[in-house]
Amino acid sequence: MKLNICHLYPDVLNLYGDTGNILCLQKRLSWRGIDCEVTKLPIGKNDDFSRFDLFFIGGGQDFEQEVLLRDLHSGKAREILSAVNDEKVFLCICGGYQMMGQYYKLQSGRQLDFIGAINMHTEGSESRLIGNYMFRCGEENGGSLVVGFENHSGKTYLDEGVSPLGQVLSGYGNNGEDGGEGVRHKNVFGSYCHGPMLPKNPEFADLLLQTALSRRYPEVLLPPLNDALEVSAHDYMAKRLG
Amino acid sequence: MKIKIFLAICACKASVFFLRLMGRGGTAIPGKIALKICPELLGHLGKNVRTIIITGTNGKTTSARMAEEIFAQSGLSYFSNRSGANLINGITAEFAGHAGLLGKPKKSFALIEADEAASKEVCRFLNPEVVLVTNVFRDQLDRYGEVTNTLESILAGVKNSPEALVCLNADCSLTVSIAEKIPNKVIFYGVSLPIYEEKVEEVSDAPFCIRCKHEYEYSYHTFGHLGGFFCSQCGYKRPAPDIAVTEILNRGENETSVMMDMFGSPEELSISIPGGYNIYNAAGALAISEAMGLDRDTAKKAIADFSWGFGRMEQFDMGKTKARMILVKNTAGCNQVINYLGNLRERSVFVFCLNDHIADGTDISWIWDVNFEKLCDLGEMLESVYVSGIRSADMAVRLKYAGIDGEKLRIFEDYGELISAMGSQELPVVIIPTYTAMMALREKMSAAFGGKQFWE
Ligand SMILES: [Zn+2]
């Protein structure tokens, strides 16, 4: 058994420890004796997207945004779009999450056009939505309680026909207005959750892995792991925010 | 005006006095009170003091302590903000503490470590004679995650220092960019070869050219994004340093010796503290010394005599064993500590204390960018890892995913229990705390084993 993971833009989208998500996926597979290969696709590098089971995109800084958009629009955007439509699993955090939408309208009025894989958009705001936060995933997304750290000035609005990943219990989430956090579209999971997201939310991490695994090996179920340390980090923050 | 200055200084001195009476050492509150009474106080107090400012993301404190040793051995009359209070309040209090009640300075020189964000104001008031910029890295306190923001703050400070001789790290592509935006005379210092035979793998904080956004190429790396960078598209590159480390002669567990080229003359230098990053700190301190025209042999001797600074490899006697404390603030700094630990030749206990107060950085996700995996290479040399602090559970999870054996991992929710566990065994201990964890631990360890409070 083997999963192929693609880490998109590890060279520029690497802020706030988000690469810890990749490490978490790798470890949780290897602890269960499942092989896994991680392919890094930095700017300028391409690959056959159809061979991957799971994609990860993190968040980055504005300085590299131009370089990134140039690369996206020179072909990767199209590849990503078709992988999304093939129902491949994606975990997209912060900047990577925004990128899956239609566009980002900066405060200056300038508009950055993104991949448009999901009917949603982001608007720049004066204030920064920052701090530890907590949300509960919808039933269709496993229903687990997720804790983490959000840090964004963009406010994301889901447009018609698109549902959030979960509902905010503490903190801001997508925009600090409608109570929604993140997005679930086909098998794309988008969120503002740093921390990084997966290590101390093992239930959610396993949901991603199970979804990816089920596409390739329909009858395989992930056996449970000893998550005592993970759960204790999770519960500490849940209690603090609760 | 004179009355206001007088009142502000009195209020500052009095509040420092009362805080100490209560057993507290802070300078931020006294400074704040003084600035409330007289907002321009720092400018008045700095008028007749020749000021040297040190700023940058990492290495400020150690560079400052090394420069201080040079000042002391050169016989200069100086003061410095030793306690690490590097924002405008603390710096103001430091100046007030070294002035008479009418604002007349008691010392000729001030050696000031300034926070990157505060450097703009601090430089405007103090009109420094020398400014040293150590480097620019991503810091977890930077809520925007943008290194270019930090760079802008530092540049604003340098621009407010029209008379200063500016010392810049030639190996940091971000820092070097300051040179072309200022008319000041610049001294570049750097390390012209890889520092480590083997170092941790790191993500670069500045992979793309600051001028044209093309990806940099490197002739060599020292650590992080530091090294022999050049841009093949626009020609932006590492400048030839005036003060360069050209060879590493000996890399000991307790010291390093190097060959340097200082304005064309070869010099052998012994640095009395280990850790590759301290080579930069020593070179930076020497750059200050050269900028001020101090005697070179005295400066070299001072670097050789230098002893541990506050929170930066301080040593504690714990009865049966000794502990070293190394403060960590961000990924780049912590990776340097991991490099250092990787060179230890003695079976040891490591202690990570992770807090998430404002002074530590409220977002602790940076620990996932640190290459803790490297610790596994230590094998038997690593006896055990203790974790503590507010976010000890997160730290434990990080170490688990780094591959640290669960048998070696112990979590202490209480500092008292942590300290007795450290003190009841005989192996050397290295404590790696974030800022507020360091302050708390220091106090508790001093109480348990004796030692000075930081303001003494
Ligand atoms: Zn260039």
Image (spheres, rainbow, N blue to C red):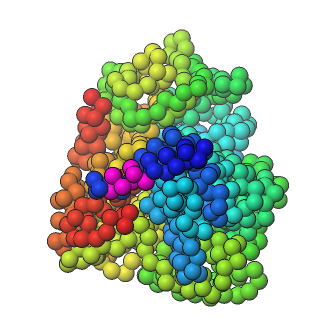
Residue at image location 44% in from the left, 25% down from the top: A173
In the displayed structure, B199 sits above or below A158; it is below
Q: In percent of the image, x 37 and y 67: which residue is there?
A: B456
Quarter that holds the N terminus of chain B: top right
Q: Is residue B15 magenta?
A: yes
Indicate whether residue A32 is drawn in magenta.
no
Q: Which residues are magenta?
A: B13-20
**A128 and B214: which one is in front?**
A128
User: In which quadrant of the rendered view does residue A61 lie?
Assistant: top right
The image quadrant of residue B23 is bottom left
Snapshot quadrant of residue B295 = bottom right
Q: Is most of the magenta stretch helix, strand or loop? A: helix
> In this orientation, does residue A67 appear?
yes
Q: Position of residue B111 (x, y in %)?
A: 57, 65
Residue B203 in sight from this viewpoint:
no
- Along the horizontal axis of the image, is B99 left or right of B180? left
Viewer-nearest residue: B76 or A14: B76
Which residue appears at 66% of the width and 26% of the height? A106
